[in-house]
Amino acid sequence: MLKSIAVMTSGGDSPGMNAAARAVVRTALYEGVTVWGIHDGYHGLLEENMVKMESKDVGDIIQRGGTFLGTARCARWKTPEGRQLGYKHLIDRDIEGLCVIGGDGSLRGASLLSKETGIPIVGLPGTIDNDVWGSDYTIGCDTAANTIIDAINKLRDTASAHRRVIVLEVMGRNSGWLALISGISGGAEYILVPEAPYDLEAICEDMKKAYEKGKRYILVVVAEGAGSAKEVGDFIAERTQLETRISVLGHIQRGGSPTVIDRVRASQLGEQAALALISGLSNIVFGFSKGHVVSIDLHDSVNNKKKLDPDYLHLSKVLF
Ligand code: ADP
């Protein structure tokens, strides 16, 4: 049984990180274990920016986006010397295990720390991209998808009024999950993702035919990793001569009050992470599979690339 653990959020923030950290803190306290909150991710650990947490410190945060602990990117963590210093700062305070809530990069940094020092590590996938291998779900992806749907609904109204083509760029440098899921649920005609090749010339020919048959508008959702809205929109406008407008959602997708799904799942994951760490488990990431919490090997999780669900890809073509 560990007596003292720490929790941090790292990398890109995502709605629901607060719920996860809150659950880690309150579960540890419930189990009679000391719990530290590290501010600003690995950067804060190197700067010794950490405090012992009490239950009230995580009050009034479950409904907030962002992360009350703060997050950061930290180049020094990529060096063995940086990680050794971070380890020293943990053991100086008798912290025996660390929970890292973050994306792919943060989990990679955690995996290296555990390999090099042996300190128990449990990861939680916190990213809107839903791209962590071994889990169907990452903390924040549901809120981000709902933010995009809201934008799509509004864009459809104006697109229909003017018979326009709208190209909406959403986040996803390496993963098309957000584009795919929001495109399907928003009724997009075309969804462009980095994982699947597409033929924009053929799409333009289809669009022209659809407009000749009386279509009033077309919505294209493009993940940033599959091309920019500007490039795609300019190409479509030039080839089809249809009135085309672009919209780039940007960081709006990261913010906002978390959905019910993100709050509940993040809380479940936080509880499991704390219990696992306290019981001495290490090198695991908790995620969801088929609606249930599952544990995934940390090294497998960072060394494999998650694939887009082919059923969703197929569905997006069927529903066009
Ligand atoms: P995310 O966790 O959202 O994927 P990043 O990829 O920016 O965000 O990673 C967050 C932080 O995790 C980085 O700033 C760095 O401190 C650490 N990190 C990322 N990749 C590595 C790596 N290969 N080795 C060690 N640390 C890493």
Image (cartoon, rainbow, N blue to C red):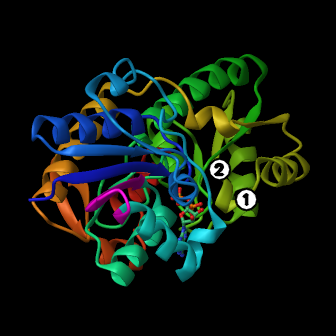
Residue interval drawn in magenta? 91-101
Question: Is 31 a magenta residue?
Answer: no
In-front residue for pair 190/221: 221
To which residue does mark 2 refer?
A: 222
Q: Is residue 309 visible?
A: no
Q: Is residue 163 left or right of residue 72?
A: right
Question: Is 95 a magenta residue?
Answer: yes
- Give the spatial CA distance, label 2 vs label 1: 7 Å
Amino acid at dot 1: Gly
**On-image quarter of the N terminus:** bottom left
Q: Does the CB distance between marks 2 and 1 fall below 8 Å?
A: yes
To which residue does mark 1 refer?
A: 227
Counting from the top left corner in percent of width and height, residue 40 is at 55, 47
Counting from the top left corner in percent of width and height, residue 315 is at 39, 51
**Label 1's element?**
loop
**Label 2's element?**
strand
Q: Is residue 288 left or right of residue 238?
A: left
- Closer to the N terminus: mark 2 or mark 1? 2
Image quadrant where residue 227 sits: bottom right
